[in-house]
Image (spheres, rainbow, N blue to C red):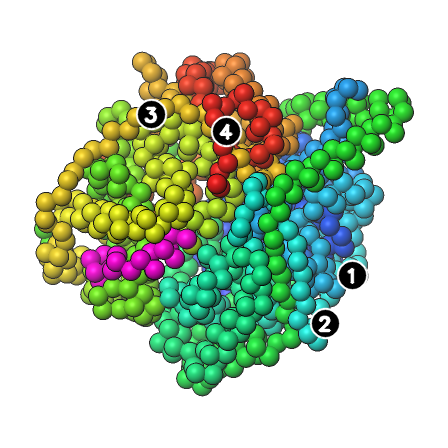
């Protein structure tokens, strides 16, 4: 436990034991500047640091967002042009990023290595307090916006990383709606402005306003400093004081976020979003309320529970009323507790124009019915139980626990210095809510938050054909008129400025500048791989693989069914089953009651399809259907009972319910694919040449989306076939001979599950079924998929293996080099794309892909020249060390127990041995620039396939359609 005497430059404000975080929380204040400090002391080795500033916007220029990018482009002590990238490729970070929120900007890092943690913190502190933005005006131009014209005969254009990123954001109707909801409900506050930047307003940002924003808000007196984990707090806080805080005087920073006055009556806001072709439906209807105070943890949790019970859980009553009324094809809802005045929104998607009044009437009638007749108490208890399980499990996937906790603390700390730890103990708040279930508390909350709340806004978005094209044309004409008014001297200035920026971007930092960035040595890295834990046993006649990791009493079970012999025509139906299970009635439960039973009795039950590469044979893979169950040891019997109920007695004959599910899935995929276009484009490009990726595309990619669209459009004529094929798929998949069991935990699984598995196996299908290994016909389609997006997602893929070119661990290092050097410089920095990625898999295939990219053919040209870059690659010892450390950082990410079990089981299924990954790790650690140059033929082979797939702006794809064999609309 820390003592006040440990911190001479800080005043102790509060100390609190936090059982939920297995440690202590300390609130401090820096004596000289008033900087706020929060420490969480526990034994978590994945240490987290962050510094945040309250940064309320006053306009839509996105200055906060552009500044977030820009401060990481060099500083006084670390003057290289991109310290962020140098850290990414040369540190053992477990998290490294920066985020702009509507009212704050946060700079978090995490690492398990104490020296690395200190190094990352040092670079970030120098970046936020002493950035190079005052010295180099090119930084604003590169990261924010600039005029671009290379020759007097060229068009005048806008370009910039954030400018292009936000063009991508504003291409999504979901993002546009979220923006408009905040603008409507909090119209007299900073939340009415777009902190990320509206592309129409970004070019209004001047250098003077940019620097003024930093000078005003990036001051210790406006800072929130957070350290978490097994940290040497005395050392780090002394360093922060001596190197940074002590050099400032206390300053009054007017950054308080104004509260929106409560509306006297609901307000309405209408707008449009762009679509490529005319749609009869496609209207977004939303009902939005201001919902309390972000510092009130108990009320915030209660609102989340209401969201689940009323709208989100399978068969949620209010959601069902909206769907049954035929108002739209999907209903969404969310509670946003991350701003000072939390918002709650109910959204109907793909509605028809003219249903606005009916939407409000139906929603309020359904809410009133729940408030007056009483909520399903069992459903509330089940929701609370579900939240309790999640908080105890504390599994946030790839994100460090300390990061999520720190961001959560800011939801109260940012608005009230006395409430830094207000949101630290959610389990106590949940316990209090459980006591209120029978008191009418939740029913009263419905009345207060929705029915009697005058602070609400109805926001409607209508589809407008070609809106983006119209706006682009207007901008083009505006810039053309501007160019026409320029005299020769002014035009030449812009041409020279474009040239100067390009030279800045293409000129590497000096070796002296790069060497100022602290890095580790290869001796800091273990050469030993993390072993797998796979113990094969037989339980109930089934092969089970046990992974003995400490799980705090949680049993993680994966029931993995081999789909290798599932006929090709049934593949998309297997994926549909993952969407249908839990959302249709079963033999003993309605699907609403089923969800309640699952949440009351276990921690979760989920379904997914996937595949494993089989490393012992070229182009071999094993597709599977997985049922994932998590529960406490004493809940296994209940869990198995529920698993059997869902898997073996779900009713596939309710046409009305199946039609709703298909329609909702279509609507979700309409927005999901454009939002993750880089992933879908890369997978589609791979599907032209790789049998496994062809399967993946059919099961969950664009091929599956085309299947869903056709099914949605012609549901009535295909309903009987759908029901028949779903049953066929079940009979082919859920068979004893297909099952392998994966179990994670420190239990005697044989005694725990023997009886349950014997019974389960007896219930699996055993009647004859047609089996057939899919034999895909591969075709290089080279497709362009048109959307209403303002940006592109551009991919190219190929096979890099040929005679003598087997998979090599150094390809992982090459991925790091591409991601943080060649692709970063040419696609992101120079090209203006928000992101660029690549990958090389063990089965011999690889890809390049871009994210929110203003370009198309220019990006493909970068991909084509990649082999030449590799062939001529040179790096000194220090640079190679950084690339290797950055690669190991990605390999050695800390994993939660469930993920460790999944890692081991994946290796078991794929045939990956410890010896194989040890060999690859050695190849990574021993890589030299000569090793990298030897991979040039790999990239040349890969790019020789000539595959291309792009998703993006319809006009851009039409203008450059010679790149493709076919161009078509994605959504039609």
| Disc with the residue nearer the chain's start (4 vs 1) | 1
Mark 2 — residue? Answer: 261
Q: Please state which of residues 412 and 511 is positioned toward the viewer in this rendering.
A: 412
Q: Is residue 178 visible?
A: no
The answer to which of 38 and 153 lies nearer the viewer is 153
Placement of 212 over or under 660, stated as above or below: above
Q: Looking at the image, do the residues carrying marks 4 and 1 touch, with CB atoms under 8 Å apart? A: no
Badge 1, how many Cα within 10 Å: few under 14, some, many 20+?
A: few
Examine the structure image and report whether residue 651 is included in the region drawn in magenta.
yes
Mark 3 highlights which residue?
Answer: 778
Horizontal side of residue 119 vs 312, given as left or right? right
Q: Residue at the front extreme?
A: 717
CB contact under 8 Å: marks 2 and 3: no
What residue is pinned by disc 1? 254
Looking at the image, which residue is at 60% across and 79% down?
A: 452
The answer to which of marks 1 and 2 sits earlier in the sequence is 1
Residue at (66% x, 48% y) in the render: 196
Q: CA distance from mark 2 to mark 4?
A: 50 Å
Compute the Cα span from label 3 to label 4. 19 Å
First to last magenta residue range: 645-663
Left or right side of 683 for 494? right
Nearer to us of marks 3 and 1 is 3
Q: Position of residue 949 (x, y in %)?
A: 48, 29
Which mark is nearer the camera, 4 or 1? Answer: 4
How far apart are labels 2 and 3 at the CA level? 61 Å
Q: Determine whether 627 is above or below 287 in the image.
A: above
How many neighbours does mark 2 have within 10 angstroms: few (below 14), some (14-19), or many (20 or more)? Answer: few
Q: CA distance from mark 1 to mark 2?
A: 20 Å
Secondary structure that dominates the magenta span: helix
């Amino acid at each position: 436990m820390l003592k006040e005497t440990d911190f001479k430059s800080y005043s102790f404000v509060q100390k609190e034991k936090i059982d939920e975080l297995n440690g202590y929380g300390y609130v401090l204040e820096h004596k000289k500047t008033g900087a706020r400090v929060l420490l969480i002391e526990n034994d978590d080795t994945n240490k987290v640091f962050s510094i945040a500033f309250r940064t309320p916007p006053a306009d839509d220029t996105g200055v906060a967002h552009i500044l977030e990018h820009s401060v990481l482009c060099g500083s006084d002590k670390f003057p290289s042009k991109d310290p962020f990238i140098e850290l990414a490729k040369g540190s053992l970070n477990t998290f490294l990023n920066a985020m702009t929120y509507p009212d704050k900007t946060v700079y978090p890092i995490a690492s398990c290595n104490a020296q690395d943690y200190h190094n990352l913190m040092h670079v970030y502190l120098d970046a936020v307090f002493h950035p190079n933005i005052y010295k180099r005006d090119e930084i604003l131009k590169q990261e924010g916006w600039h005029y671009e014209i290379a020759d007097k005969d060229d068009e005048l254009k806008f370009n910039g990383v954030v400018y292009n990123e936000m063009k991508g954001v504003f291409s999504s109707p979901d993002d546009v709606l979220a923006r408009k909801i905040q603008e409507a409900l909090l119209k007299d506050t900073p939340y009415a402005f777009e902190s990320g930047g509206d592309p129409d307003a970004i070019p209004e940002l001047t250098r003077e306003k940019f620097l003024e924003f930093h000078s005003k808000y990036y001051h210790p007196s406006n800072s929130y400093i957070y350290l978490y984990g097994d940290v040497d707090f005395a050392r780090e806080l002394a360093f922060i004081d001596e190197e940074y805080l002590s050099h400032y005087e206390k300053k009054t920073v007017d950054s308080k976020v104004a509260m929106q006055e409560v509306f006297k009556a609901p307000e309405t806001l209408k707008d449009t979003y762009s679509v490529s072709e005319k749609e009869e439906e496609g209207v977004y209807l939303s009902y939005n309320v201001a919902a309390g105070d972000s510092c009130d943890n108990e009320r915030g949790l209660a609102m989340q529970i209401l969201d689940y019970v009323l709208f989100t859980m399978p068969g949620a009553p209010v959601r069902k009323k909206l769907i049954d009324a035929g108002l739209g094809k999907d209903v969404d809802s969310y509670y946003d507790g991350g701003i000072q005045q939390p918002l709650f929104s109910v959204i109907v998607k793909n509605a028809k124009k003219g249903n606005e009044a009916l939407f409000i009437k139906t929603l309020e009638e359904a809410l009133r019915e729940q408030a007056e007749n009483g909520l399903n108490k069992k459903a509330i208890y089940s929701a609370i139980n579900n939240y309790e399980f999640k908080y105890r499990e504390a599994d946030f996937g790839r994100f460090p626990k300390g990061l999520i906790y720190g961001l959560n603390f800011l939801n109260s700390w940012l608005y009230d210095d006395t409430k830094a730890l207000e949101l630290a103990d959610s389990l106590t708040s949940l316990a209090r809510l459980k006591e209120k279930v029978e008191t009418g508390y939740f029913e009263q909350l419905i009345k207060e938050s929705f029915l009697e709340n005058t602070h609400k806004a109805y926001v409607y978005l209508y589809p407008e054909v070609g809106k983006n094209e119209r706006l682009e044309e207007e901008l083009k004409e505006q810039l053309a008129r501007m160019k026409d008014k320029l005299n020769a001297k002014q035009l030449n200035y812009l041409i020279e400025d474009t040239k100067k920026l390009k030279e800045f971007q293409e000129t590497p930092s000096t070796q002296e500048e790069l060497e100022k960035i602290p890095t580790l040595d290869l001796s800091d890295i273990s050469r030993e791989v993390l072993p797998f834990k796979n113990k094969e046993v037989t339980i109930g006649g089934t092969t089970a693989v046990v992974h003995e990791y400490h799980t705090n009493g949680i049993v993680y079970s994966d029931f993995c069914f081999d789909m290798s012999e599932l006929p090709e025509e049934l593949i998309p139906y297997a994926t549909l089953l993952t969407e249908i299970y839990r959302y249709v009635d079963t033999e003993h439960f309605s699907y609403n009651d089923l969800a309640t039973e699952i949440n009351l009795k276990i921690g979760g039950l989920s379904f997914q399809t996937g595949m494993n590469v089989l490393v012992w044979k070229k182009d071999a893979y094993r597709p599977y259907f997985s049922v994932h169950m998590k529960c406490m040891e004493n809940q296994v019997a209940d869990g198995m009972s529920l698993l059997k109920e869902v898997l073996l007695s779900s009713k596939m004959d309710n046409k009305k319910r199946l039609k709703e599910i298909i329609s909702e899935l279509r609507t979700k995929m309409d927005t999901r694919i454009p939002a993750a276009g880089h992933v879908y484009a890369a997978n589609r490009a791979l599907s032209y040449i790789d049998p496994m990726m062809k399967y993946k595309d059919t099961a969950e990619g664009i091929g599956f989306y085309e299947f869903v669209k056709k099914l949605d459009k012609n549901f009535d004529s295909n309903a009987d076939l759908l029901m028949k094929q779903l049953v066929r798929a079940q009979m082919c998949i859920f068979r004893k001979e297909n099952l392998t069991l994966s179990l994670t935990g420190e239990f005697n699984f044989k005694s725990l599950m023997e009886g349950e598995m014997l019974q389960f196996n007896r219930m699996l299908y055993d009647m004859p079924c047609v089996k057939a290994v899919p034999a895909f016909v591969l075709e290089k389609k080279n497709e362009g998929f048109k959307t209403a997006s303002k940006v592109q997602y551009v991919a190219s893929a190929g096979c890099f293996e040929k005679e003598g070119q087997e998979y090599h661990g150094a390809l992982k290092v090459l991925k790091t080099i591409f991601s943080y050097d060649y692709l970063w410089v040419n696609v992101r920095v120079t090209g203006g794309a928000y992101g660029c990625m690549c990958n090389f898999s063990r089965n011999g295939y690889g890809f390049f892909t871009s994210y929110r990219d203003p370009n198309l053919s220019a990006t493909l040209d970068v991909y084509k020249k990649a082999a030449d870059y590799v062939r001529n690659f040179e790096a000194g010892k220090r640079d190679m060390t950084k690339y290797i450390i950055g690669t190991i950082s990605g390999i050695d990410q800390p994993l939660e127990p469930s993920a460790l079990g999944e890692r081991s089981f994946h290796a078991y299924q794929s045939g990956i041995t410890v010896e194989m990954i040890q060999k690859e790790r050695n190849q990574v650690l021993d890589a030299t620039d000569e090793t990298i140059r030897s991979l040039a033929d790999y990239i040349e082979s890969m790019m020789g396939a000539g595959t291309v797939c792009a998703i993006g702006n319809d006009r851009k794809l039409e203008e450059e359609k010679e790149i493709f064999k076919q161009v078509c609309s994605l959504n039609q």
